[in-house]
Amino acid sequence: MPWYLPPDTVEARNTRNLYAETMWFGVLSGLAKTYVAVFALRLGATNGQIGWLTALPALITIFWMVPAARLIERQRRPMPIIVVTGVLQRLPYLAMAVAPWVLRAGMVEALIVLNTVAALPAAVINTAITALIPELAAPEQRGQVISVRWLLLATAEMLAALVAGQLLGLIAVPLNYQVVIGAGAALSLLSIRYLVRLRVPDTALARAPQPEGRTEKHTLRQRLAGVLVQRRFTRFAAASFVFYWGLYLPAALWSIIRVRDLDASDAWIGAIAMIVGVSTIAGYFVWGKMAARRGNRWLLNVSTLGVGVYALLTAAVPSIEWMVPTSILGGFTWAGCNLALFNTLLTVCPADRRPTYIAVYTALINVTAFLGPLLGTALADGIGIRPAFLLSGGVRLLGLVLFWRLLR
């Protein structure tokens, strides 16, 4: 396994610390993605409230990503701001664990607010670490580092969700969710010790300081205009924008279909999360090798087809047991899709302005992440949850057509 290689160089030590940080953060990531919405549903949240729980973090990201990128680019020493925002990202989840002891009413609304607040520091640290990866790994090792990092993240998420699913049935609501989410947030703070060990050049992400006032605003407009004239980037961003509409349309519906439509227990929800995790891990091993042989464009087209079919099949499942094979397909193909999207994004972003390009792309995608769940819950209330999944699959396949036509 590549993370067991002796850390004889700065690059090797950086890679090992990045892997360790990723695994400890994955504990919180797996619990948050799997159980925060379920927690809200157990407390009586409506479909609309689940939509807002999923959508509002994306709204924050839309308006905050570009300023966050400019904040990062102004740092001559990137690591202090990464460490601070890493700590701040964990605090709202600790507050979720404490909130039921403090609030007598409005607990669902509190979950929505805290989940939204967590998006502010998350935008900074995610953009910074993504932009730092080329500084942490040589070009010939970058694909392996990205694959292993995501493999470890998926492993940690899977194990955390599986263990939590078994524990939740042993304690009454809401204390069971308080214990699980609070423990996950506390354990994820261990990742900070590995963040502080990363060694990167002080000016790795910094750009020359810009004058304040009118000139600075003018420079921002010039930067955004410069991003839009990069044809390779705009083609990729346009196809991704359509594809992510299909991806985020049912984002708030997964918990709803499992809890309300299929009447799944917390143990089954944890088991499904484990199945998705195992399939994703297997996918990273397989798709990484296929990408090296066939290229990112081939990988993107094939894996996007699988992700589209996954949504279509979900619309037809008659019981929670039938989500086992569909989840295997979804996790396996999403691993390839995620890897191809990330590698392609790094390819179409100019190296000297990577944080700004990543921020613009992320802000654009988060338009769909904000509006998609709200539209999805509205469609579920209007035409039914299963037709909403069918529509999601159709839009994903439209995104596949655009990837095939626009990327050369």
Image (tube, rainbow, N blue to C red):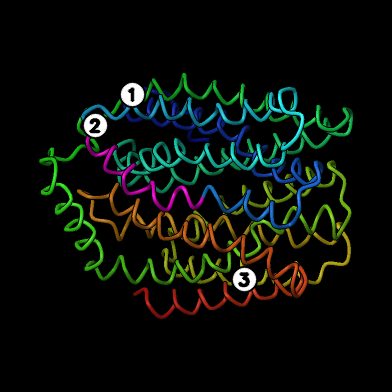
Most foreground residue, 196 or 211: 211
- Name the residue that disc number 2 marks: 75
- Name the residue that disc number 3 marks: 308
Label 3 neighbour load within 10 Å: few <14, some 14-19, many 20+: many
Looking at the picture, does residue 406 appear above or below residue 331? below
Left or right of 264? Residue 282 is left
Left or right of 385? Residue 88 is left
- Name the residue that disc number 1 marks: 80
**Disc 2 from disc 1: Cα separation:** 9 Å
Q: Residue 248 sits in which quadrant?
A: bottom right
**Disc 3 from disc 1: Cα separation:** 40 Å
Tell us which disc is closer to us: 3 or 2: 2
Q: Position of residue 170 (x, y in %)?
A: 89, 29
Looking at the picture, does residue 19 appear above or below residue 309? above
Left or right of 99? Residue 85 is left
Q: Residue 250 sits in which quadrant?
A: bottom right
Residue drawn at 74 percent across, 52 percent down: 255
Three-letter code for the amino acid on which mark 1 is drawn:
Pro
Most foreground residue, 10 or 111: 111
Three-letter code for the amino acid on which mark 2 is drawn:
Gln
Q: Position of residue 322 (x, y in %)?
A: 84, 62
Three-letter code for the amino acid on which mark 3 is drawn:
Gly
Label 2 neighbour load within 10 Å: few <14, some 14-19, many 20+: some
Q: Contact (CB < 8 A) between labels 2 and 1? A: yes
**Disc 3 from disc 2: Cα separation:** 40 Å
From the image, give the main secondary structure of the stretch colored magenta: helix
Q: Which residues are magenta?
A: 58-74
Q: Which residue extends farthest front?
A: 105
Most foreground residue, 90 or 48: 48
For marks 3 and 2 on the same chain, the one whose residue lies earlier in the sequence: 2
Left or right of 351? Residue 87 is right
